[in-house]
Image (cartoon, rainbow, N blue to C red):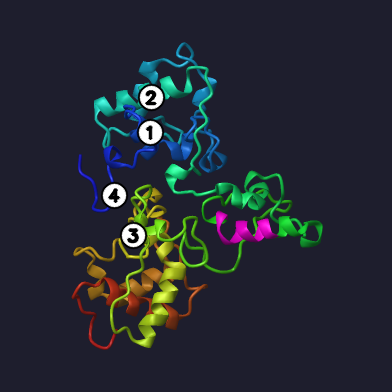
Amino acid sequence: MAWSAGVFPPTELPAADSAEPVPGKAVYRYYCYQCHGYSGDANTLASSYLNPRPRDFTAHTDESLAIERMVDAVKNGRAGTAMVSFASVLDDAEITDVVEYVRTSFMSGTPLHEDYHSIENGWIDHERYASAFPFIQGTLAIDTPGEQLDANQRAGKQLYLSACISCHDRANTGGEQAIWELRAVSYPREHYSHRTEPLDLVSGASPYAVHDVPAEPANMTERELRGMQLYQDNCAFCHAADGTGQNWIGSFLQPRPRNFTAETFVLWQNPDGLRNIVRDGIENSSMPAWRDVLTHGQIDEIIAYMHAAFAAGETLQPGRH
C-alpha cells in the first residue's frame, strides 16, 4: 500500500497504550472514527450532517448485523449513504480485521467508552475547557444574548468561538444561522493550542504536528512577512502551515488541498492563474473564493510569501513577484 509523504499508515499510528495491539483498531481509528466515533455509537459531528446517519454499531448484535454484510459494506460501500468503498485503500485482511474489531468492541453488549479528547491523543486536562461544553453539546444556544449568560458561560462562549468551533462547528442556535467570528480560525495555531510546549511539536500522538510548523524563509521582505501572517490566518487551516496540505484538517478533505511544496505544482509559473484561484475559488472542491475576504493587495502578498516559502527554486514570471 502506498502512502503520501508525511501521512502515517494505520500500522504506524501512535498506540493509545502499551497493551498488545488489537487487529483492526488502528485501521478503524484512521478511517472510521470520524463518522462512527471512537466508541462506535456514531455520536459524532459528521453524523449531525449526514442523512442517513452513520450506523450506530452499539445498537446491533452479532445476530442483528451479519459479518458478511459488514465486510461487503466496507469493501463496496453503500449507495445513497456516506459509506464509501475502502477496497482501494484496504486489503481483504485489513477489512476482515476492522470488521472483527467493530463486532468485538461495539456489538458485544458491553459499553465501550473511548474518547477522542484523551491524554493519549494529546489532550491534557480536557476538563479545563468545560465552560465551552454546553455550546458544543447544544444545551446552550450559541446566539443566546450575552445578558442572559453568566460570567462562566460568557467565557465558555468565547472559548468555543475562538477554538472549539474549528472542529465542533455544529452549534445549536435559537435563530436560523450559527454565529461565527469575522476572523480566521486556524487549528490549532496562533490563538489556541490544546497542547502545552514543548509537547505540541514533539508528541507522537499527532503525526500531523510537524506540518503545523510555519515555513519561515530567511530574509523575507515586509511584503512577504505580511503575506505570511495572512497565509497562516486564512490558508494554513487546510493547506498546513508548511504548505504541504498534510495537516489534520487537510487529511479529511476530498479533493485534497494542494501541496505547494510539490515539484509538480506548476502554478508557480502562472501567477495569474494562482491569483485567480485564490480570488474565485475552485468549483466542486473545498477551496472557497476569497475575493470578498481579502483585497487584491493581500492576495498578492500571500502569493509573494508562498513563493518565498514553498517554491523550492522556481521563479515567477518577471515583474509578477
- Amino acid at dot 3: His
- Disc nearer the start of the sequence (1/2): 1
Q: Quadrant of residue 320?
A: bottom left
> Is mark 1 in CB contact (under 8 Å) with mark 2?
yes
- Which amino acid type is marked by label 2? Tyr
Question: Relative to residue 308, is residue 195 drawn left or right?
Answer: right
Label count reads: 4
Crowdedness of circle 1 by 10 Å Cα count: few (<14), some, many (20+)?
many
Residue at the disc numbered 3? 211
Name the residue: 42% across, 53% down: 249
The amino acid type found where label 4 is placed reads: Val
**Mark 4 or 1, nearer chain start:** 4
Cα–Cα gap, marks 1 and 2: 8 Å
Question: Mark 4 = which residue?
Answer: 7
Quadrant (top left/top right/bottom left/bottom right) for the N terminus:
top left
Q: Is 292 placed left or right of 21 in the picture?
A: right
Instruction: Indicate yes or no whether the magenta region holds residue 262.
Output: no
Residue 57 lies, with reference to residue 180, above or below; the image says: above
Q: Quadrant of the C terminus?
A: bottom left
Q: Secondary structure at mark 4?
A: loop
Residue 257 visible in the current orientation: no
**Above or below 264: residue 90:** above
Residue nearest the viewer, comparing 98 with 265: 98
Residue at mark 1: 28
